Amino acid sequence: MSTIDTLDQSSDTLPFNHTLMNDVAIQDRDRLKNLPHKNELGEYESKSVQRTLDNSYVPESILEARLVQDRIIRERFEGKALRIADIGCGDGYHGEVFAPDCVSYHGFEISSEMAEKTRQRWQESGLNNTEVTHGDASKIELKPNSYDVAWSLYFTSGNFREEFDDISKYNDAYLDQNPAFIGIVSNFYRALRFGGRLFLTVYKDRPETEEAQRTFYKKTGQTVVTPKGSRFVATKENFWSVRWTEESMLSNLAACGIQPEQVKFNDLNDISWLVEVTKV
Ligand SMILES: C[S@@+](CC[C@H](N)C(=O)[O-])C[C@H]1O[C@@H](n2cnc3c(N)ncnc32)[C@H](O)[C@@H]1O
């Protein structure tokens, strides 16, 4: 595994004028008031899809990737006074770990049920430097230069897509220039300070990864609807998770204005990378 150096933010963190919010519900409502928000990706309202967050259902290779991801980000960022954006924050686990040391920790979550779980978890933990924004991460207005780190962990960015009933529309051309992924990554890339980092945990496009995904989703009680050999796995429960090649990632990142020299593919294990983008 490649060694990932530490983001040194002592010299170049920008000033941050942020009001600490206790009542995240008010903040959520105000920020989204005028946005054309529609909760299109409601799959995390399903109990079987929520089980994918529970390690007891996770196959060994995916669990290994998750644990290595967490070890790496803890080694690099725990104990640092950073402004972190968590794209697709799920049940808020990472905020609980990092927020106590952060200047601010902001979660963005499209599922109302997951946003509520995060909100409760962070309130119960007494965190007063956190915010949860409920909505589609591509549509949320963000201030430029407002984050040191933005991350989308545990294969979340592989879920970003427009909803089509006809899954044949997720063809190679779509996956190499995925408008939903590009919208979200562009939004958060703009919001990073110069020298800031974006992290995406993603699946490598390998047969053993697909096998692990199919086993995983079946184990959580979902019905897989994609034939073997597809570049993504979709389920009847509306779950959708794509795998990546270096080329497909670079092609999508190029559409966000990110050049290959800015991108590192850090191996987590045989089936996954922690993709790291430095803002220049
Ligand atoms: C695989 S889960 C990961 C949760 C968490 N980051 C973790 O590491 O456990 C993906 C989460 O991203 C959310 N999500 C998917 N698409 C999103 C979007 N367009 N905007 C905001 N959140 C999104 C889902 O609702 C889900 O809670």
Image: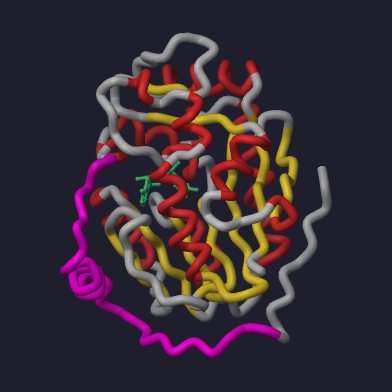
206 relative to 233 in the view: left or right: right
- Quarter of image, res 45: top left
Please, what is the dominant secondary structure of the magenta stretch? loop
- Asked if residue 225 is among those painted magenta in the image, a careful observer would answer no
Q: Compared to 238, does 191 lie above or below?
A: below
How many numbered marks are there?
A: 0
- Quarter of image, res 21: bottom left
Q: Residue at x 38, y 66 (%)?
A: 122
Q: Residue at x 47, y 76 (%)?
A: 144
The front one of 177 and 117 is: 177
Q: Compared to 59, does 81 lie above or below?
A: below
Q: Is residue 53 visible?
A: no
Q: Residue at x 69, y 78 (%)?
A: 9
What colour scheme has been applied to the protein in the rendered image?
secondary structure
Q: Is residue 264 visible?
A: yes
| Residue projecting furthest to the top | 227
259 relative to 227 in the view: left or right: right
Magenta stretch?
12-41
Q: Residue at x 46, y 49 (%)?
A: 182
The front one of 109 and 176 is: 176
For the N terminus, the image quarter is top right
22 relative to 160 in the view: left or right: left
The front one of 137 and 257 is: 257
**Residue 96 point in image, percent of width and height:** 48, 63
**Residue 123 point in image, percent of width and height:** 33, 69
- Asked if residue 17 is among those painted magenta in the image, a careful observer would answer yes
**Residue 271 point in image, percent of width and height:** 67, 29
For the C terminus, the image quarter is bottom right
196 relative to 171 in the view: left or right: right
**Residue 91 point in image, percent of width and height:** 39, 51
The front one of 266 and 263 is: 263
